[in-house]
Image: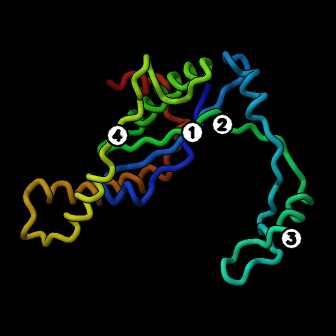
Amino acid sequence: MYFKITNVGGQKYTDMGMINVDASFYLEPGDDGYDKYIAEHFVTVPIRPPEGYTGKVDKITGEPIDKDYKTWIATLPTEKRLNPFCNHSMQFEPSVTEEEILYCFELALSMTHANYLKDDLSCKIGGVTVNQNIHYDSRKAYYEGIKIIPDISKTPKMILDSKLISDAATKVSSFKDVDFTKIPTEVVYKVK
């Protein structure tokens, strides 16, 4: 089993002083459930040229005209691709380290694999939902509010929380060049 980090960042979370990380989960030959995984997730997809679709588009929406687009897609060469068996998105505070991110995704990968074998990817362990409500709406409203309050009127906590927004943006930028596959696994498992 392995996972690939597919995205670090996301303005909606950065604006709330958090870092969003997305990952795709894959099984490898020899993993339990691999045959089922291949049967369900090995798909044939068109190979799109770098220039993309250059045919007729709707003048208002810019979307391809269905008939022309479908004809174009049908003429493209294809390839077999292994899709992930699951995708996860996690949000972290700006103080997070690469090792802590990897630890969380390693844990999620092992739990998700166990649930995949049970045909239950509803993110539950022993009947308890693993997905935690981070109170997205209330946190978003709070951060939108502190952005418009003049600094002179902010409480000390609001000032510290405002700094999380720039800290999150800085951390996201620093992670852009991190190759998460190069961080040693033994370091990951030492994180407490």
- Whichever of labels 1 and 3 marks the residue nearer the N terminus, that label is 3
Question: Mark 4 and mark 2: span between their CA atoms?
Answer: 24 Å
Callout 3, which amino acid? Asp
- Residue bearing mark 4: 133
Residue beneath the point at 7% across and 70% down: 152
**CA separation, marks 1 and 3?**
32 Å
Label 4: element kind = loop
The residue shown at (48%, 29%) is: 123
Gap in Å between the C-alphas at discs 2 and 3? 30 Å
Mark 3 neighbour density, 10 Å: few (under 14) some (14–19) many (20 or more): some
Q: Earlier in the sequence, mark 4 or mark 2?
A: 2
| Amino acid at the residue labelled 1 | Asn
Q: Secondary structure at mark 2?
A: loop
Residue furthest toward the right? 75
Residues at marks 4 and 1, CA–CA distance in whole angstroms: 18 Å
- The residue carrying pointer 2 sits among few (fewer than 14), some (14 to 19) or many (20 or more) residues within 10 Å by Cα, namely some
Indicate the position of residue 116 as horizontal and vertical percent values.
60, 23
User: Between marks 3 and 4, how big is the CA–CA gap?
Assistant: 44 Å
> Nearer the viewer's eye, disc 1 or disc 3?
3
Q: Earlier in the sequence, mark 2 or mark 3?
A: 3
Residue at the spot of label 1 = 87
Residue under circle 3?
Answer: 68
Label 1, residues with CA under 10 Å away: few <14, some 14-19, many ≥20: some
